[in-house]
Image: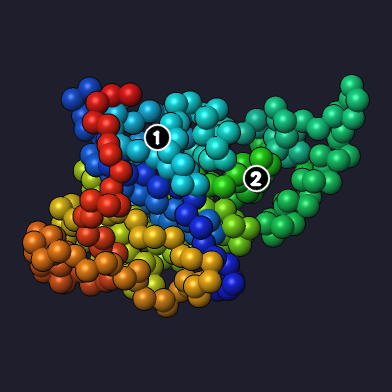
Amino acid sequence: MTHPRAGRSRERVLTMRGIGKRFGAVKALTDVDFWVNEGEVVALVGDNGAGKSTLVKVLAGVHPPDAGTIEFDGEPVEIDSPADAQDLGIETIFQDLALCDNLDVVANLWLGRELRDGATLDEVDMEQRTWTLLRELSAKIPSVRVPVASLSGGQRQTVAIARSLIGEPRVVILDEPTAALGVAQTAEVLNLIERLRERGHGVILISHNMADVLAVADRVVVLRLGRNNGVYNVADVTSETLIAAITGAVDHTGARWTPPAPTPPSAPPPGRGRPAATPEPAPAEEAAADPASADGDTGGTVIRMPRTGSRRLPREDGPR
Ligand SMILES: Nc1ncnc2c1ncn2[C@@H]1O[C@H](COP(=O)(O)OP(=O)(O)OP(=O)(O)O)[C@@H](O)[C@H]1O
Ligand SMILES: [Mg+2]
């Protein structure tokens, strides 16, 4: 699969550091680090209950974190509600898609943001813009004037993704977008994710399907039992390695996952086949304490970042 990103510098959009979230006695997230650049697809993988949905719900403003910091475009932010997330430009497509089945494609896309011509709805403009967006996404929707109930699962996913793009978000989060789809429809949605990357959105893809992840992601973040358990460049990793990290057969939970500095605009763009981001030299004691560097047998190139005081922001550990 091609990654047509030549010439694009990839600015950091979002950085989460030390995120913690408890539900009563359940520690859903502990000290999780995560980042996404523009024009990058980051897969978030992990076993059931690993904390994937909780982490994206923190970004979506559904669950305020108990600990940690979030930076958006380099500025610290607090995301206390879904409206906060939307204002920042973070759109989440949850698995139920939340479409209105009885409304047509145009109405679904513009619901709550309808274009008006005086007192009446500007149906022509909305329809034209809908077609423009669908064409840009190379989406296969036969008509935009049919109720979405009559569309296939893949087409409904397409409508949900197109709707999320109306406000030109910086980050698009997809929770299991291919879980209920057949082979052809899955390919269609993966193609759509490539289009999102081309348009420069940062994409976070939650998936249990390693084939999908390897086909479309640039980077994979593994969560296990609510903690980071590895960050891998897709170019360097196999599904066996990912599964080992997901199941805990390899343990990187002691490692630090602070993001590397974003790619400067003048640097050559990253792409598939690139080497993994080069970690700064770790202090000797930290390299020894890092199980990944100790065993050296990860089967893939883990992006390991040493714990450095200067990169680490002060954290609040109490509830906000
Ligand atoms: N609203 C909630 N109230 C209480 N516990 C919760 C809540 N949401 C999640 N949890 C718990 O937090 C942990 C992480 O759940 P989460 O849904 O984030 O996992 P996940 O990685 O998305 O799993 P799956 O692959 O099954 O979707 C689980 O132990 C879950 O039971
Ligand atoms: Mg989930």
Which residue is nearer to you in this view: 96 or 76? 76
Q: Quadrant for the C terminus, please.
A: top left
* Whole-number angstrom distance, CA of label 2 to CA of label 1: 20 Å
Q: Where is residue 138 in the image (x, y as percent from the top left)?
A: 69, 60
Question: Is the residue marked by circle 2 packed among few (<14), some (14-19), or many (20+) residues within 10 Å?
Answer: some
Question: Is the residue marked by circle 1 packed among few (<14), some (14-19), or many (20+) residues within 10 Å?
Answer: many
Residue indicated by mark 2: 168
108 on left or right of 308: right
Q: Can residue 48 be seen in this view?
A: no
- Residue occupying image coordinates x 38% and y 67%: 234
Which residue reaches farthest front? 310
Q: In this view, does 186 lie above or below 16?
A: below
Q: Is residue 106 visible?
A: yes
- Which label sits on residue 87? none
Residue indicated by mark 1: 58
Q: Position of residue 19 (x, y in %)?
A: 30, 39
Q: Position of residue 311 (x, y in %)?
A: 30, 52
State the image quarter where residue 276 is shown. Answer: bottom left
- Residue occupying image coordinates x 8% and y 61%: 285
Which residue is nearer to you in this view: 134 or 311? 311
The total number of labels drawn is 2
Considering the numbered disc 1 on the image, is that residue within a helix, a strand or a loop?
A: helix
Q: What amino acid does circle 1 point to?
A: Val
Q: Looking at the image, is mark 2 or mark 1 earlier in the sequence?
A: 1
Q: Is residue 266 above or below residue 317?
A: below
Q: What amino acid does circle 2 point to?
A: Glu
